[in-house]
Image (cartoon, rainbow, N blue to C red):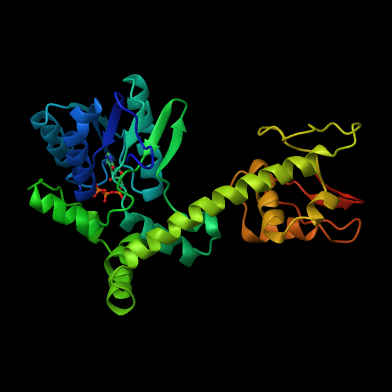
């Protein structure tokens, strides 16, 4: 925590506690450090109403908060949320709202090295670039004034389990974790144990370390791509109704990119520039094919053009320019 500058002293920390082993380990560690750092801790629990025992789970966490004499905040979904992605979105919104209303500067979650390893494998199998593999950051701003922090990213799930046993922390077992119809659970229950037994006993830490290395590289490449994009957009002829710098996020079209600027750059940055541009135009994340089609225009003959992207925009080569309209 100290070497990564995850927290400052005398702050208000909102801890997201599901009742599982990871978040119980997290809250116990932070409670023990609370007085030394001068923190005020609060516990937040989100009831997705997904499982039949979710209300009992919420009571369990509430009772723990009482025994630790810690503020408790419960957010309950209006109707059951039964997809993992929707649950995550709703949870982060609920946590941000609690933090905002109660003046917390940090939201803290119990994500571990095992979560990082699983996310890396999950994204690798689906076909992703380095960005999908870097999986889970130590800290990132969630909304203005609120930082999301994950202090357990170097600790594996077997360590949090052992910790909970040692300190006799009452874990609420999540029955859906055993359900092998979810890809994530199959990675956790089948793929990782197989890799551990047959390839590397420390596979989770090894994969988490890969994610850590990729994180710094992705950050560096994204910044370089952003500079290149600004340069490619900024060389516009003043007659065109274009912003000389970044396109505005809401109405970025039409825009044009200077091919001569892009031709000098390595392919890795060309692709990233095109992805950044498409991210501003398309409603969904740009696909590999979309990025490749746009990147191909950097050296394509004059007048070449792409098929329409979702939403109808097309890109066309006009001399030294790729014009998106
Ligand atoms: N229902 C919830 N209420 C509050 N926080 C949650 C909830 N579900 C997850 N979190 C937070 O997000 C982190 C990661 O979630 P994930 O779903 O991977 O964990 P989990 O397996 O449900 O539980 P745990 O991490 O506590 O063992 C948790 O450690 C916890 O901090």
Of the pair 16 and 197, the residue shown nearer to us? 197
The location of residue 133, given as percent across then percent down, is 48, 58
Residue 287 placement (x, y as % from top left): 62, 57
Left or right of 283? Residue 229 is right
Q: Is residue 179 above or below residue 273?
A: below
Residue 187 visible from this viewpoint: no
Instruction: Determine the residue positioned at 36% across, 42% down.
Output: 3
Residue at the bottom extreme, as displayed: 198
Please state, as top left, top right, bottom left or bottom right, where the C terminus lies in the image.
Answer: top right
Question: Could you say which quadrant of the image residue 292 lies in?
Answer: bottom right
**Camera-side residue: 297 or 165?**
165
Tell which quarter ligand 1 is in. top left
Image x and y of residue 320, in percent: 89, 50
| Image quadrant occupied by the N terminus | top left
Task: Locate residue 311: give its quadrant.
Answer: top right
Residue 305 position by quadrant? bottom right
> With respect to residue 159, does 169 lie above or below?
above
- Left or right of 90? Residue 169 is left
- Numbered marks: total: 0
In the depicted structure, whether residue 57 falls above or below residue 320: above
Does 131 sit left or right of 280 as displayed? left
Query: Does residue 313 appear in the picture of this structure?
Result: yes
For the point 85% across and 52% down, which residue is it? 260
- Residue sticking out furthest to the front: 3
């Amino acid at each position: 925590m100290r070497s990564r500058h995850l927290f400052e002293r005398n702050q208000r920390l909102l801890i997201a506690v599901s009742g599982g082993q990871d978040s119980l380990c997290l809250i116990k560690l932070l409670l023990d450090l609370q007085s030394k750092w001068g923190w005020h801790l609060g516990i937040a629990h989100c009831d997705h109403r997904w499982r039949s025992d979710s209300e009992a789970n919420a009571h369990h966490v509430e009772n723990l908060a009482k025994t630790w004499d810690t503020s408790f905040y419960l957010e309950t979904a209006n109707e059951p949320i039964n997809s993992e992605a929707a649950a995550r979105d709703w949870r982060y919104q609920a946590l941000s709202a609690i933090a905002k209303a109660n003046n917390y500067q940090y939201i803290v979650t119990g994500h571990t090295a095992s979560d990082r390893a699983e996310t890396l494998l999950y994204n690798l199998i689906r076909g992703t670039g380095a960005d999908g593999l870097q999986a889970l950051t130590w800290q990132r701003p969630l909304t203005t004034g609120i930082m999301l922090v994950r202090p357990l990213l170097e600790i594996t799930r077997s360590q949090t389990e052992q910790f909970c046993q040692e300190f006799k922390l009452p874990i609420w077992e999540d029955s859906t974790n055993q359900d092998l119809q979810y890809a994530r659970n199959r990675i956790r229950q089948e793929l990782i144990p197989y890799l551990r037994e047959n390839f590397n006993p420390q596979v989770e830490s090894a994969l988490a370390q890969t994610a850590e290395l990729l994180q710094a590289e992705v950050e560096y490449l994204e910044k370089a791509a952003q500079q290149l994009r600004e340069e490619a957009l900024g060389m516009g002829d003043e007659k065109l109704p274009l912003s000389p710098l970044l396109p505005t996020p809401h109405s970025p079209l039409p825009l044009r990119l200077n091919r001569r600027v892009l031709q000098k750059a390595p392919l890795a940055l060309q692709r990233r520039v095109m992805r950044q541009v498409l991210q501003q135009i398309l409603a969904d994340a740009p696909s590999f094919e979309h990025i490749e089609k746009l990147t191909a225009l950097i050296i394509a003959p004059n007048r070449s053009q792409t098929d329409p992207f979702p939403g109808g925009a097309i890109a066309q080569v006009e001399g030294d320019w790729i014009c998106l309209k």
